[in-house]
Image: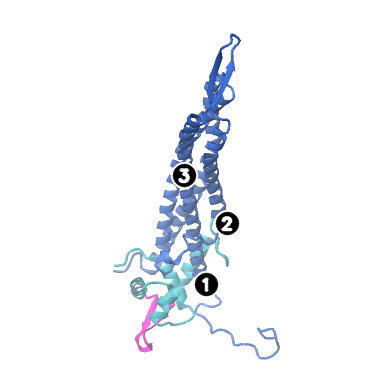
Chain colours: A blue, B cyan
Amino acid sequence: MDRRGGRGKALPTRTERVGEDTGPVDQPAFSDLNQHLASLDGRVGSMARRSRRFSWLSWGFLFATYLGVFLWAIIGILFPVVTVTTLTGGGTSTTTTFPWWDFPVLSVPPVAMLAFAFRELFLGRRETSKRTNGPIGNDPKEFGGYAAGWTGTVQRCQQRITHAKSEVEWSFVPIVLGWFSFVWIGLAALESVLAPGIGPVAVLLFPLVGLASIVLLYPLYRYAKGWIAQYQELLNRRVGELSKLEAEFLWRFAGGGLPT
Amino acid sequence: MMERPDLFVIGRLLEALTPGPLLRTQLQQKAGLNYSVFQRYLDFLVRLNLVVVRPADDGRVELSEKGVEAYRFLSEGLVRIFGLTGHPKVGG
């Protein structure tokens, strides 16, 4: 049976290669390593892209929250709900409040922004643990159309990781600020629309809800920092091992240093 | 004097030569390097006696015995570091 699955003369075998039958060198190790580099580059690129989006959406959340405050006030002024109550003495009392739909409608954009921001964070984590090729990192144009070397790839990966780390860290500032504002607006809306008499309760609730929010956000912050740190650690470990191999290589094949 | 050489680039050049001698342009294409980088690395490998340029054979480049040993050393070292067994894995 030949290699085509039929009877007859077998196809000629490939010409014997240098170093054949000597173990791992038979395998195209560097072709695999090129894929490995591209994969690493793709994953880090994906992480950078997601963390950048997370950063933009975090600032978008803060912006949308403050825009919501502004619009909430404008709507309250333009479409006030006026309640006229007849007093027992015969006179009337007029109360002006915000329309009930004001806060729910205006809270949708910031909540959506925050939800999309966290989605980016979780997708980033998932993609970087699975993907083999990335739309950013694996584009040959980024290498000037040529295959990448380890040094250039590592430098770029390290830069991207540093940026991603910084972006994620700073993104929690607008989220915390926005969340405090959001809670405050929510309580103010509750007070003005539903129960005008709960002022002191709202004063107590505000710091408590803010504190609860921070407690919830902190694990998320640690999580984001953790998975970025994993990549940093991986790269540092690889760099260390490669430096050792490089030193051994130069010692063995270049007499301990680079030829002049 | 050459700056710190990239072991991946050296490995790719040596690997491209394992099936047999190649013309410079073929080697450059197989290793995926631009001309100036290729020239620098080729000079480096020649100075280390890892490859031999044969002027009588259209300037074909060939692996020396030392080059075969160097390729084995590098591929084994990199496979050990990255734990590659056919398909590359990242994630340590």
Residue A130 marker: 2
Image quadrant containing the C terminus of chain A: bottom left
Gap between marks 3 and 1 measured at Cα = 39 Å
The answer for how far apart the CA atoms under marks 3 and 2 are is 21 Å
Total numbered badges shown on the rendered structure: 3
Quarter of the image for residue A128 reads bottom right
**Could you classify mark 1 by the number of other residues whose Cα lies within 10 Å: few (under 14), some (14-19), or many (20 or more)?**
some
Horizontal relation, residue B41 to residue A138: left or right: left
Crowd around label 2: few <14 · some 14–19 · many ≥20 (10 Å): few
For residue A237, which numbered disc appears in the image? Answer: none
Check disc 1 and give the amino acid type. Pro
* Contact between labelled residues 2 and 3, with CB atoms less than 8 Å apart: no
- Disc 2 marks a residue whose amino acid type is Lys
Q: Chain of mark 3?
A: A
Mark 3 or mark 1: which comes first in sequence?
Answer: 1
Q: Is residue A84 above or below residue A253?
A: above
Residue B41 lies, with reference to residue A124, above or below; the image says below
* Magenta range: B47-65
Q: Give the x, y percent position of residue A225.
A: 49, 44
Q: Which residue is mark 1?
A: A28
Query: Where does label 3 land, which residue?
Result: A168
**Chain identity of mark 1:** A
**Residue drawn at point x = 34 percent, y = 72 percent:** B44
Other-residue count near label 3 (Cα within 10 Å), few / some / many at <14 / 14–19 / ≥20: many
Q: Is residue B76 visible?
A: no
Furthest residue toward top: A89
Q: Nearer the viewer, mark 2 or mark 1?
A: 2
Q: Callout 1: helix, strand or loop?
A: loop
Using the image, determine if residue A62 lies above or below residue A4. Answer: above
Under circle 3, the secondary element is helix
